[in-house]
Image (cartoon, grey):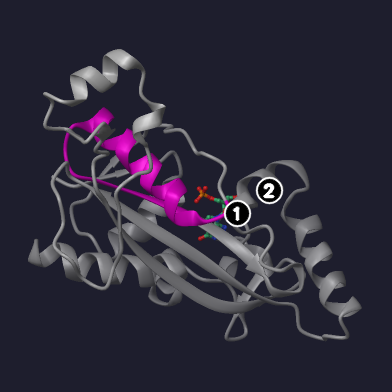
Amino acid sequence: MLSYVTTNQGKVREARAYLDGVEAVEFDYTEIQAGELGPVAARGAREAYGHVEGPVIVDDAGLFVDALDGFPGPYSSYVEETVGVDRAGELARSAAEADGDATARASFRCVIAYCDGEDFAATPEPVDRGERRGQDLGADERAAASTDDTVDAGRPRDVPVKLFEGVVPGRIVPPRGEGGFGYDPIFEHDGTTFAELSPAEKTAVSHRGRALEKFAEWFAER
Ligand code: IMP
């Protein structure tokens, strides 16, 4: 049984379009602060796997505004909680305007991280193997490392995590629509904001849908 670990029910509704029978598990794993989505999702997947003790996916997403050099990106949650979606949208549009750009171009990115405790064969999608190094270990841990097969030359092996990324281009507009969540009302793709779409319509074109599609295809083979 595959578990989608999140506290965001909006994500689960969207995932069901691709993953029949996925179980939603509400668990608030640690979201580390990092400059990229991949390591945040990988860290979350490891923690979620430890909690569920079975195959899990988590996803980490963000809004990347061109005129703000990709900000808020991995900091999107923080910006939503502090500045709020509407003001973040105004900031994005005025930054584009200051650049002489009538369109505030942006993209949504989503990284799905899968973990089941096993290793993965090489495919185009990357595997995150963690970053703990020997020098992070105390003397006792280093001694244990020499007899423990979960460690490699003083370097504990993190559980591998497979990553699947989806990206959708769009532009930032004044808020429209009542559906979706987060930045959906200010993100327009093909003339419609994501908040104007049903979950199924959004998933058919969204960053999460694109990442889920890649994942679902790979998972069916596993
Ligand atoms: P996280 O992936 O749950 O960490 O979300 C990061 C931030 O992006 C939060 O502020 C979410 O509300 C927002 N977010 C994530 N996915 C979406 C989406 O599909 N649409 C709109 N906002 C999103």
Residue at image coords 26%, 73%: 124
- Prevailing SS of the magenta stretch: helix
User: Is 151 a magenta residue?
Assistant: no
Q: Position of residue 96 (x, y in %)?
A: 82, 77
Marker disc for residue 21:
none
The residue pinned by badge 2 equals: 80
State yes or no: Cβ of the residue under disc 1 lies below 8 Å from any atom of ligand 1: yes
**Above or below — where is 5 with respect to 126?**
above
Between 18 and 222, which is closer to the camera in this rendering? 222
Q: Position of residue 209 (x, y in %)?
A: 38, 69
User: Is 54 a magenta residue?
Assistant: yes
- Is 165 displayed left or right of 115 in the figure? right
**Above or below — where is 182 with respect to 141?**
below
**Amino acid of disc 2:** Glu
Residue sitting farthest toward the top: 140
Q: Position of residue 133 (x, y in %)?
A: 36, 36
- The 10 Å Cα crowd at callout 1, few under 14, some 14 to 19, many 20 or more, is some
Magenta segment boundaries in residue numbering? 35-60
Q: In this orientation, does residue 80 appear?
A: yes
State yes or no: Cβ of the residue under disc 2 lies below 8 Å from any atom of ligand 1: yes
- Is 130 displayed left or right of 93 in the figure? left
**Amino acid of disc 1:** Gly
Mark 2 → mark 1, Cα distance in angstroms: 7 Å
Where on the picture, by quarter, is residue 132?
top left
Displayed-image quarter of ligand 1: bottom right
Marker disc for residue 182:
1
